Image (cartoon, helix red, strand yellow):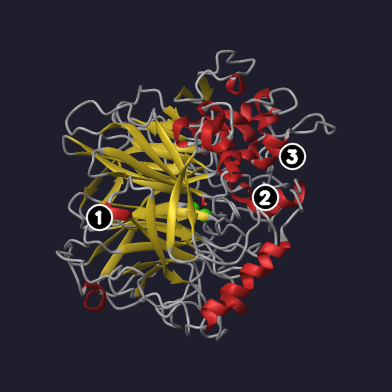
Amino acid sequence: MSATRDDELSFDEFDEEHYPRSKTTDFQTISTTVMSRRNFLGSSAKFGAAAFIMGTTSLSGLAGCGFLTKDFEEVEANSHDTITVPDGYQWHVVSMWGDPLWSNSLPFDPETRGTAESQALAVGDNNDGMSLFEENGTLILVSNNEYVNQGIIYGNRESKKPETDDDVRKGMAGHGITVAEITEQDGKWSIVKDSPYNRRITANSPMEITGPARGHAMMKTTADPSGVLALGTWNNCGNGQTPWGTYLTCEENFNGYFSSSDDAYQPSSELNRYGVGNKDWGYAWASVDDRFDISKNPNEPNRFGYVVEIDPLDPNSTPKKRTALGRFKHENAELVVAENGHVVVYLGDDERGEFLYRFISSEKYYEGENNRNLLENGTLYVAKFNDDGSGKWIALTPETTGMASQAEISILTRQAASSVGATTMDRPEWVAVNPNRAEAYLALTNNKNRGKKPNAGGDPTPVGGPNPRAENHYGQIVRWRPANQDHTSDEFSWDLFLVAGNPSVHNDDYAGSDNINTGNMFNSPDGLAFDDSGFLWIQTDGNYSDKDDFAGMGNNQMLIGDPVTGEIKRFMVGPKECEITGITWSPDRSTVFVGIQHPGEKGNSHFPQGGEAVPRSAIIAVSRDDGTALS
Ligand code: FEO
Ligand code: CA
Ligand code: CA
């Protein structure tokens, strides 16, 4: 995330400043690990991404080998205020923040930037993860609207902040999910207004609480004394898609919307662990609804931080919060059906020093049967990586954690994971599962605190294993292979697919792994997805200053990686001050839909309309000039 709230602060930085966490770090442990890791790294020239721990030669039947070297000319890094794609490719805008979904919606007004009423009937702000669904030939694009750019949506206000109740409600309506039918005409994709599928889900839409936490005492509030119905979802970051036709949306920085009207209020340590405190991030939601005031409703934050399952084909369906998948700052939800039929979901918690999780369903998936409640019950695990390239999944149960119940583990998942000694990671972002083999990839975007500060729970963050550099501001991608090619195995082996860095500035570990060079370098990998051919698309949300440590990297971008050879090529560069996030393909694979989030978040973009236009987050369609399939 790189939204501005105290202008230049990231979400984590804001939390650290306003809610200082435990300062207790086991420096002895850290320095010991630093030393041994340095020795280990010193024995090999660099990380050597091609040096698989497990050997790669068994990759057979992989379609499209060689695609990367012959298929497109790598795009150069740049700081232009537009999209750059390779020669032979083209792009256009499919939808933008504020585009009307119905013919009675008001068109986007660049002067007022909309009202609560117009925003509720229009595409939300800051599109993030997305998936495409098909029913009888109709295509339905579902996309997250992670947060709102206050400096832009309140750009009509002197303060650039919400000044009226309607402003606050406009912000609430800009969050959530946009469901919209799309169609292609004359080579251009656009939204079909008034489609019966069109729907906005916002911070006020009713959601059923399911799974272990349903009805638990910690989930009960004045407005919902039974703890079974929450209102809304927000900060919906990455996503997932199930084989039974539903969409998964992931609640990430849910904490930044709560505040206290009583300055003297002391939030519990449980709230503190999740960054919930007396000050919000400027959204002012508590000014229109007391449920966001933690001094009055201390349990309300316990109802957020989940994965929510939505049926996009039924606009009247009630979304379901799947508490069995745990409560944390969820990034995405990568679902794979294991060979034994159990559903496995990989889940990252995006905060410095937090963890990687895995859910396994209790029941099995049977194609064509009713699989609708598979995410209701199961076991949640957390990952422990060993320095020798092995790792294991630790089940989070009352027995392993000492916690009272599965419900408590579902609500206080971070505390559960800390109690079993899981590996503190460099901000787990998206996970993507390779369609060609039992193997998963995780973007670890960056962590300036690595080796310096504990996580929010006081767990040390030693340098080593999949987090090999102190003060890591470039990020890396770790991958693991479950034992016996079985995603339900409790053992795995891992290596680093790439370690980002800047070889034009550094000649040590900060230069990155061998597959990073001055032609393809980037920082802060975030979005990850495999295409049908088994290539890994990598999206970035990093430092776009193009200066100092980041010189030569330009704007945020999208690259394609070959999991077999380790080759990485830059496919696209975004406009100024954007993040590239969210990706899905048309059924014929001739179009890839890509999310351009927060262009001009610091005031320096007019993307996509140009001229003096207000910058607007957008979903774009990229295709080959000749219209042939991309993957
Ligand atoms: Fe919403 Fe971790 O990115
Ligand atoms: Ca991000
Ligand atoms: Ca992200």
Q: In the visual, does 186 lie left or right of 381?
A: left
* Dot 2 crowding, Cα within 10 Å, few <14, some 14–19, many 20+: some
Q: CA distance from mark 3 to mark 1?
A: 43 Å
Name the amino acid, label 3: Lys
Give residue 394's position: percent from left, percent from top: 47, 45
Q: Earlier in the sequence, mark 3 or mark 1?
A: 3
Give the labeled residue for mark 1: 435
Q: CA distance from mark 2 to mark 3?
A: 11 Å
* Dot 3 crowding, Cα within 10 Å, few <14, some 14–19, many 20+: many
Give the labeled residue for mark 3: 279
Identify the image quadrant of the C terminus.
bottom left
Name the amino acid, label 2: Arg
Kindly identify which numbered label has been placed on residue 5.
2
* Dot 1 crowding, Cα within 10 Å, few <14, some 14–19, many 20+: some
Q: Quadrant of residue 309?
A: top left
Is the CB of the residue bearing disc 3 within 8 angstroms of ligand 1?
no
Residue at 61% in and 55% down: 352
> Which one is nearer the viewer's eye here, 445 or 138?
445
Disc 1 element: loop
Q: Quadrant of residue 510?
A: bottom right
Identify the image quadrant of the N terminus.
bottom right
Query: Which callout, 2 or 1, points to the residue nearer the camera?
Result: 1
Give residue 211's position: percent from left, percent from top: 44, 25
Residue 615 shows in this picture:
no
Is the CB of the residue bearing disc 2 within 8 angstroms of ligand 1?
no
Q: Earlier in the sequence, mark 2 or mark 1?
A: 2
Query: Which callout, 2 or 3, points to the residue nearer the camera?
Result: 3
> Which one is nearer the viewer's eye here, 261 or 502?
502
